[in-house]
Amino acid sequence: MTKKRPTLNPPHLLVVSDCHGNIRQYDQIFSYAENQSCVGIVHCGDIGPRFNATTKDQRKFLKEFFLAKTETLKQKRGSDFPIYAMMGNSDHRANELYFWKEQTTNLGQDRYRCIDGKIMPFGKFFISGYSYIPPTPFVHKEGERRDENGDDADRGEYILKGESTTPEGGMVSVDLQNLPTIKQELTELFLNHQDLDKTIFICHAPPFGTKLDCHKSETHVGSADILDMLKENDFLCSFHGHVHETVKMSGHFQDRVGNNKIYTVGNNPVADNPFVLLFELPSRAARKGNVLRGQLINSQFVNV
């Protein structure tokens, strides 16, 4: 049984993931963000329609829907209202340059801020994103990287060679063995960053073997390198997506790795109403912040 909660008054981030082009879900997300206590949106990846959509279909969705929604919200909340987003493994990397280019209007104003492979200021905090997942059994490899420490992990079957889309709509061969590992890219990302304890770490993939990594195949599909990164460093917190059914499977939307509180959205992309995380920002440096998970129904928060 669900219970309606009163409107959240503390400033909070709206964290979403794996919408996969579901317009009904996006309508509720952007409507909720008009709430004055919502101080920003974070999208953890898989923005556009599922991978069986063409590159042109996904670009059309970005251009005609996602960009329009961000601009409308900015008009209502102000041009400085932050929307952080990155692609996921189902988003065609052939559109990556377009996605980066269109984050800024011709007038130099942000529509959204692409956080993949970046560390960006957010008030007294930072937000950083990493979009790649470990290898899957699927032929599409453009959103994947190898785990340096996890190729032998119990993640079930996977392949390292496959294909990637091109901006022209074609395909090119990809061999993940010729690309950097997740560990190498994360090490480079945080090499000179001294404020990890003030950084909100956004990963599309969950850390391997945690409560955030429960797949319907009963194998784990998360990243061992991301797990190691969390074990070895203290972030403010981390948010993840990718495994739609993990909360249903595990009964948990949160876990802990080392000193880090870690969370997953666990959104079902074919449902009418999106599952989201509401992150209450810490008021003091010693606090890690509070997170609630719920479902947006008619733009109201419902406790689950």
Image (cartoon, rainbow, N blue to C red):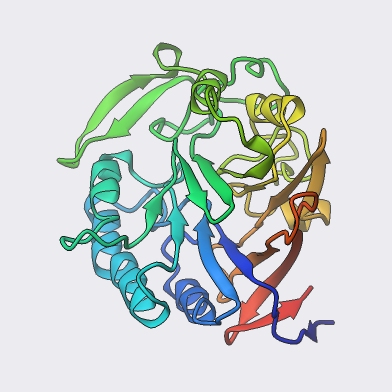
Residue 68, placed above or below residue 244: below
Q: Residue at x 42, y 47 (%)?
A: 87
Q: Residue at x 43, y 35 (%)?
A: 143
Question: x and y percent of residue 99 in the render?
Answer: 29, 50
Residue 184, placed above or below residue 143: above
Quadrant where the C terminus sits is bottom right
Question: Splitting the image into 4 quarters, where does residue 206 fall?
Answer: top right
All told, the count of numbered labels is 0
Q: Please give left or right for residue 205 compared with residue 10 in the image.
A: left
Question: Splitting the image into 4 quarters, where does residue 172 fall?
Answer: top left
Q: Residue at x 63, y 54 (%)?
A: 244
Question: x and y percent of residue 127 in the render?
Answer: 54, 47
Residue closest to the eye, 29 or 57: 29
Residue 206, placed above or below residue 9: above
Quadrant where the N terminus sits is bottom right
Residue 91, placed above or below residue 267: above
Residue closest to the eye, 59 or 282: 282
Question: x and y percent of residue 91 in the render?
Answer: 38, 47
Question: x and y percent of residue 258 in the render?
Answer: 82, 33
Q: Please give left or right for residue 184 compared with residue 197 in the image.
A: left
